[in-house]
Image (cartoon, rainbow, N blue to C red):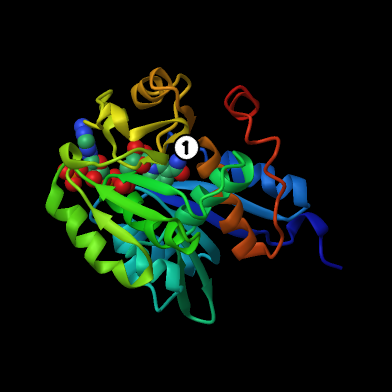
Amino acid sequence: MQNKTALPVDLYAVFGNPISHSKSPLLHGAFAAQTHQSLSYSAILAPLDQFEATLKQFIRDGGRGANVTVPFKLDAFQLCTKLTPRAKAAGAVNTLSFANGEISGDNTDGCGLIKDIVENAGVALHNRRILLLGAGGAARGAILPLLECQPAELVITNRSAEKARQLAQEFQQYGPISASEFAQIKGSFDVIINATSSSISAELPPIPDTAFKPGALAYDLMYAAQPTLFMQHAEQHHAIARDGWGMLIEQAAEAFYIWRGVRPDTARLLIKENVLTG
Ligand code: NDP
């Protein structure tokens, strides 16, 4: 008779460099406990020049799926044999599934952002004017999901203005998107999303004060124990500030759903203190 404790558990992991700060093992552990799924989820530090080798070893060891974080989302995209439309549009992958010799790639970041804004914060995006700051990986991943919400307008702005222009051109077939330089931003917005990494260095993107409609949602993708400079600035301009914690939780929940076919309840984890203090 087979020993019950020796049954293999399904293996998952997050790959990054650095990786020790990652909250993903904690979140997926909580999702697994909540939904009674038998799985193990670890954090794997891949050497910067050995992402592919490290990932393929994990697959040989029986890995069923993986999350990918900085700086490997583009490398993961290149390794996929199958991609979802939203991963193709994002040009980057944060969720991998391994089955039948295929490496399937998805990107749950954009959908995590939308879910946090629309469902958790209760802010509609349909018919709204949205300003997106930044043109890096996170901004790129957010554009298609944002346009799918049918905003009145999506304006994208970036420190290196040419990158914003390129993105606006690339996505124009999907909805009303345009690019603007920071200094030329016209009118006020219902939702302003900071997808730059400026908050990491405690800097503020040069947004004109007039961009904040009173009561607008000002969303910083970065999360921290304290409100970021962008959030503080937005509140001074009578906007309602929110950080990217909810996006982190929701992108993880979506990955969990892709792997396990069960959607975890994120409510308890959305309260940052419940997770950060245990
Ligand atoms: P990238 O490095 O790909 O892009 C960085 C972007 O920020 C670029 O557009 C860059 O402009 C801009 N930028 C950097 N510094 C400044 C500054 N001081 N002022 C104005 N613009 C600046 O990063 P990502 O897109 O991957 O990540 C962006 C942010 O989103 C990070 O804070 C990250 O932590 C967060 N994030 C959060 C997630 C979540 O789940 N909450 C998920 C993914 C990301 P330029 O092109 O001119 O260099």
Is the CB atom of the residue marked by disc 1 within 8 angstroms of ligand 1's nearest atom? yes
Q: Is residue 235 above or below residue 167?
A: above
Q: Nearer the viewer, residue 103 or 55?
A: 103
Q: Nearer the viewer, residue 272 or 36?
A: 272
Q: Position of residue 224 (x, y in %)?
A: 44, 26
Pick out the residue farthest to the bottom: 100
Pick out the residue farthest to the front: 187
Amino acid carrying label 1: it is: Gly
Look at 25% across and 42% down and name the residue there: 186
Dot 1 corresponds to which residue?
Answer: 244
Quadrant location of ligand 1? top left
| Tag 1 secondary structure | loop
Q: Is residue 192 above or below residue 140?
A: above
Figure quadrant of residue 51: bottom left
| Quadrant of the snapshot with the C terminus | top right
Q: Position of residue 167 (x, y in %)?
A: 24, 60
Look at 51% across and 38% down and name the residue there: 23
